[in-house]
Amino acid sequence: MKRRLVAAIACRNQGSRLYGKPLQNLDVEQGIRILDHIIACLRTIDSVDEIVLGISAGVENEVFKTIAEEKGIRYVVGDEIDVLSRLVKCGQLAGATDIFRVTSESPFLFFEPVDDFWRQHQAENADATFLDDVIDGCGFEIISLKALEESHEKGDKKHRSELCTLFIREHNQNFTILRPHPPAEMVRKDLRLTVDNPEDLAVCRVVFNTLKSFAPRIPVPEIVKFLDANPGLIKLIEPFTETGYATMYNWS
């Protein structure tokens, strides 16, 4: 059976440090939001067959339905806390065999290796492919829908949270998992490209507006070069890097 890769993006407006992160503008003048840019980038990746939004229930999230309709993207609505169930529903709606997971507040995907990793994922009949060691916000996960369904069925509350692949990681002996390593220049624990704080947004806006001639495929290595040439921007996000990496998945 031909495998079908569907990008599922969990969307909600809640946020204690920065409200409405996916809807924040990267380009204020042009009205290009973080979610707009993510969708545009995903549409350039040959391996991704469809994009589906997994929208959190609640009136404050109705805007995501409008965005989906404007962009001709299907969506599901589900429980705010049970993010895993929303990803599963996205996959089931689109007839996916596998889910391509990125987060809705991380605008700069390391897109270059996606097609190669998808081919490897299929060739090795993997349950999951995790690109973990890359710059915070630039990685992705490819997970079989079957593995996600099993995670939801057998896991508990913490596994059904935003830590959608935690069950697979904790029971890694029961799954075929690939962990490809990014290029050395992409392993930078002093950088982050995810929007969780106003300072993150400020940096991502500068990055986008400086490199938007590449959009929607802005190469992350180009972003790294730009940030290295502008240490003041790195200093802005420095207070958040340690906590960000500490709360990412840790493997035993």
Image (tube, helix red, strand yellow):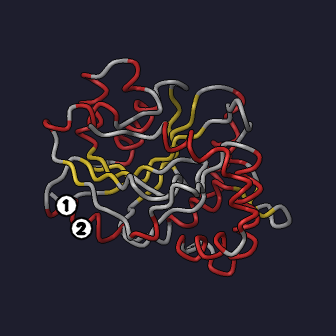
In which image quadrant can residue 56 be found?
top right
In which image quadrant can residue 244 be found?
top right
The answer to whether the residues at label 1 and label 2 have Cβ atoms under 8 Å apart is yes
Q: Residue at the location (29% across, 71% down)?
A: 116
Q: Residue at the location (39% across, 39% down)?
A: 249
Q: Residue at the location (63% across, 62% down)?
A: 37
Q: Is residue 166 left or right of residue 14?
A: left
Most extreme residue toward the right, as rendered? Answer: 29
Quadrant (top left, top right, bottom left, bottom right) of the C terminus:
top left
Give the labeled residue for mark 1: 122
Most extreme residue toward the bottom, as rendered? Answer: 213
Q: Which residue type carries mark 2?
A: Arg
Name the mark on residue 245. Answer: none
Q: Is residue 65 left or right of residue 142?
A: right
Please say if 83 is above or below 66.
above
Q: Residue at the location (13% across, 36% down)?
A: 174
Q: Which residue type carries mark 1?
A: Gln
Asked whether 214 or 199 is in front, the reply is 199
Give the labeled residue for mark 2: 119
**Residue 20's x, y, as percent?**
72, 40
Query: Label 1 to label 2, Cα distance in Å?
Result: 5 Å
Asked whether 65 or 244 is in front, the reply is 244
Disc 1, SS: helix
Quadrant (top left, top right, bottom left, bottom right) of the N terminus:
bottom left
Disc 2, SS: helix
**Residue 80's x, y, as percent?**
55, 26
Question: Would you call the spot at circle 2 few (<14 residues within 10 Å), some (14-19), or many (20 or more)?
Answer: few
Asked whether 93 or 138 is in front, the reply is 138
**Residue 140's x, y, as percent?**
42, 54
Asked whether 209 or 153 is in front, the reply is 209
**Residue 74's x, y, as percent?**
51, 48
Tally the marks: 2
